[in-house]
Amino acid sequence: MLHPISFCIPEEKIATISPHKTKTLSSSLPGKVGIRAYIFNDEDDYYADYQKSVFAITCKKAGWDCMRHYEIIANWCIPCFTDIEQCPINTMSHLPKQLIIRGNALYENLKDKSPNEYTTDNNDEYSYLINELVSYAKGSLTTSKMAQYVLDASNCIDAKRILYLSGDTSPDYLRCLLLHGFKRILGNECHDYPKIAHMYIDANTSIKHDRQNLYGKGFTYSRLLEDDLHNNSLDESIENDIIHNKYDVVIYGSYHRGMPYYKLVNKHFSPSKIILFCGEDLHSCNYSTFVEKGHHVFVREQ
């Protein structure tokens, strides 16, 4: 009942074609590595820097898993991942670690050169790695693929209606990304309560200005869902719908950040139809308690 899980990326954020490379290393560095972290205020500029670069540095920060890994790959850039060999087997279990290790070796061979000194199109190892990484991302690392993995691992493959509960609606990468994935699979038959407002496109809001106040400036995860993907009328009948089993599965996007209606849900749903996520970097996790109750628990940093 205990499962590994990783971050993921919306499919629409994966660049459609391999861009032209003009520099060896991205300008953006993790805060743990250098002072050039978080230098972009615009998501398009942030992505463009990766798209122009052959490699980008990434590393373990508070936790091993990080949105940066996925953003690098999605923009046809090879992550150079410090100490990835030390990552626990059940952490970042969905990332293609062996391909990234090969990318580290290629970076060591090319880091003192510029794209002007070699043609990446004729570099067999580069071409192989970048195409494999992007292909793998499309097949395994999108939000919809990760949401489907959750249903498959929980033996809930026939679920048609999901209640997605949150105790705190502030940004939480794992909760937000998987909500996006379930919405892509089920539309508004996946009902988020309370509504995660920053996930939805608001025609009355200046998107770029509004996103600056979100965690990570809202890059990659926010303002992606059309507003009609949330059925407002269902907000009024939550308790009654739980009592009458309107939903096939109940998911808690973060059991660390609150579990509304848990007693009621536990009374009216089979334990195996209650799914819990832990997306924390650092935690003293009580997942064994929930596993013993018969719930499926997905933990990002094990």
Image (cartoon, rainbow, N blue to C red):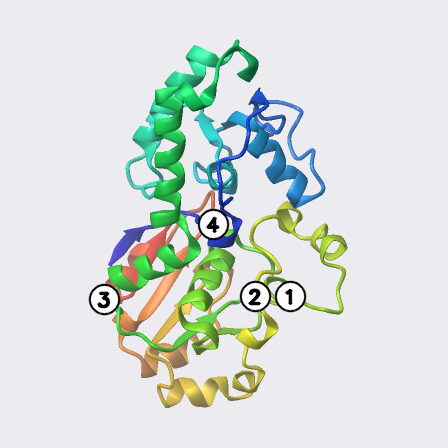
Circle 1 sits on which residue?
201
Mark 4 or mark 3: which comes first in sequence? 4
Say which amino acid is labelled 3.
Answer: Asn
In this view, 257 is above or below 63: below
- Give percent across and percent down for residue 30: 57, 30
Q: Residue at x 42, y 11 (%)?
A: 109
Question: Cβ–Cβ below 8 Å for labels 2 and 1?
Answer: yes
Q: Residue at x 47, y 70 (%)?
A: 165
Mark 3 or mark 1: which comes first in sequence? 3
Circle 2 sits on which residue?
225
- Does any portion of residue 300 appear in the rendered image? no
Circle 3 sits on which residue?
155
Question: In terms of secondary structure, where does tag 3 sit?
Answer: loop
Q: Nearer the viewer, residue 96 or 3?
A: 96
Mark 3 or mark 2: which comes first in sequence? 3
Q: Nearer the viewer, mark 4 or mark 3?
A: 4
Q: Nearer the viewer, mark 3 or mark 1?
A: 1
- Give percent across and percent down for residue 6: 39, 47
In this view, 180 is above or below 51: below
